[in-house]
Image (cartoon, grey):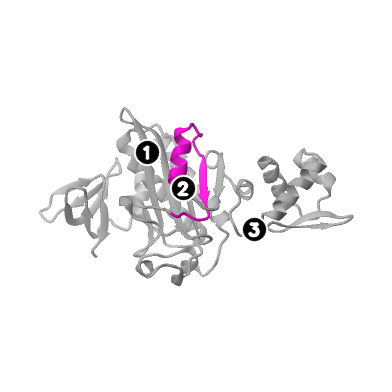
């Protein structure tokens, strides 16, 4: 049924005129009864499909809510989004995706939610993820990488997101090591990577992504208004969240496959180019200490290299970074 829905939506979207029931039977390789039943299901979910006697059907409007069948028609990826699960409400898309990965779901499985009640970021922080405003999704990945290379997966995903925001939406997005995408000092996207490891290698890794899309300034709670932004705030337009998601997945897949095929050094130049930290005075809070220094480099393994006041360099593989200047 889901494949028929996707095929039917694509046929209606592509048509420049009305399509008769016979046209849809041929295009979808389905019976008239199945076509009518599927159209009724789509109408119930918010699609506006006009039927004119003697003319046929045409698609007038797709729902504003996210829909798996609609996403399938827009998808331009070869791996990411091979399976799509869309939920109205979940605690955390990462939690759902982790269970799917452990139960054998294929690489590229995508979990999307309209709302998260327990969305989380790094260090146990909550992620503000109300319904209808942003994109909250997780991807199951299975790269052949060592456990210590998991930071490079976060960086590859962040690079893909930032490049799409810059190219497709004219937003001057930058990377904040290790896994945020920012516009100036305001976060537009956060990334949380959680993995299962066997004998020092990644068995599966789930990458959770939260992107603020349609939020207005007053939509954020007071504590976030000075530190968060959205596509709408930055551009003044309200894009389709389905389109943003498929754009982002295409950009992320490009960089993820490059990471898997060529290794992190092939991404490093572009990551450094878009880094908003390099050359800036920062603080880094790690599990063991808090240091102050100049963000000097991101090395070939994805670690942040900080130049300390005494001229020595310290390599950071995990920590919370804040800019001072």
Q: Position of residue 259 (x, y in %)?
A: 40, 39
Is residue 187 left or right of 31 when viewed as pictured?
A: left
- Residue count near mark 3 (Cα–Cα under 10 Å), binned few <14, some 14–19, many ≥20: some
- Tell me which label, 2 or 3, sits earlier in the chain: 3
Is residue 87 left or right of 157 when viewed as pictured?
A: right
Is residue 64 left or right of 304 when viewed as pictured?
A: right
The residue located at (36%, 52%) in the rendering is 121
The residue located at (39%, 57%) in the rendering is 127
- Which of the labelled discs sits on residue 63, or is there none? 3
Q: Is residue 114 magenta?
A: yes
Q: Position of residue 153 (x, y in %)?
A: 38, 42
Whole-angstrom CA distance, mark 3 to mark 1, is 34 Å
Quadrant location, the C terminus: bottom left
Q: Which residue matches tag 2?
A: 93
Q: In the image, which is nearer the foreground, mark 1 or mark 2? A: 2
Q: Quick one: which residue is furthest to the left in this view? A: 310
- Residue count near mark 2 (Cα–Cα under 10 Å), binned few <14, some 14–19, many ≥20: many
- Residue count near mark 1 (Cα–Cα under 10 Å), binned few <14, some 14–19, many ≥20: some
Do the residues bearing badges 3 and 1 touch, measured as CB atoms within 8 Å? no
Is residue 79 left or right of 278 when viewed as pictured?
A: right
Q: Which residue matches tag 1?
A: 195
Q: Nearer the viewer, residue 236 or 205?
A: 205
Q: Quick one: which residue is furthest to the right in this view? A: 54
Residue numbers of the magenta segment: 92-117
Q: Does dot 1 land on a helix, a strand or a loop?
A: strand
- Tell me which label, 1 or 2, sits earlier in the chain: 2
- Tell me which label, 3 or 1, sits earlier in the chain: 3
How many numbered marks, from 0 up? 3
Q: Does dot 3 land on a helix, a strand or a loop?
A: loop
């Amino acid at each position: 049924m889901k494949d028929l829905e996707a095929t039917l939506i694509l046929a209606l979207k592509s048509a420049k005129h009305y399509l008769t029931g016979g046209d849809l039977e041929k295009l979808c390789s389905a019976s008239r009864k199945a076509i009518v039943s599927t159209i009724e299901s789509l109408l119930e979910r918010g699609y506006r499909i006009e039927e004119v006697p003697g003319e046929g059907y045409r698609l007038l409007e797709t729902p504003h809510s996210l829909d798996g069948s609609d996403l399938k028609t827009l998808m331009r990826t070869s791996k990411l989004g091979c399976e799509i699960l869309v939920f109205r409400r979940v605690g955390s898309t990462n939690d759902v995706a982790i269970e799917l990965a452990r139960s054998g779901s294929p690489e590229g499985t995508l979990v999307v939610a309209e709302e998260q009640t327990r969305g989380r970021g790094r260090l146990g922080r909550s992620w503000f993820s109300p319904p209808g405003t942003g994109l909250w999704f997780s991807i199951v990945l299975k790269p052949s990488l060592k456990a210590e290379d998991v930071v490079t997966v976060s960086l590859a995903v962040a690079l893909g997101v930032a490049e799409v925001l810059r190219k497709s939406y004219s937003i001057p997005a930058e990377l904040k090591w290790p896994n945020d995408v920012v516009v100036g000092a305001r976060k537009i996207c956060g990334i949380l990577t959680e993995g299962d490891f066997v004998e020092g290698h990644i068995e599966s890794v789930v990458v959770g992504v939260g992107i603020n899309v349609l939020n207005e300034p007053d939509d954020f709670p007071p504590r976030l208004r000075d530190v968060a932004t959205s596509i709408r705030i930055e551009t003044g337009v309200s894009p389709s969240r389905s389109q943003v998601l498929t754009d982002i997945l295409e950009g992320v897949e490009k960089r993820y496959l490059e990471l898997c095929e060529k290794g992190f050094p092939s991404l490093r130049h572009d990551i450094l180019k878009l880094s908003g930290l390099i050359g800036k005075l920062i603080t880094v809070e790690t599990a063991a200490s808090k240091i102050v220094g100049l963000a000097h480099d991101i090395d070939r393994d994805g670690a942040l290299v900080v130049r300390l006041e005494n001229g020595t360099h310290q390599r950071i593989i995990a920590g919370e970074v804040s800019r001072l200047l």
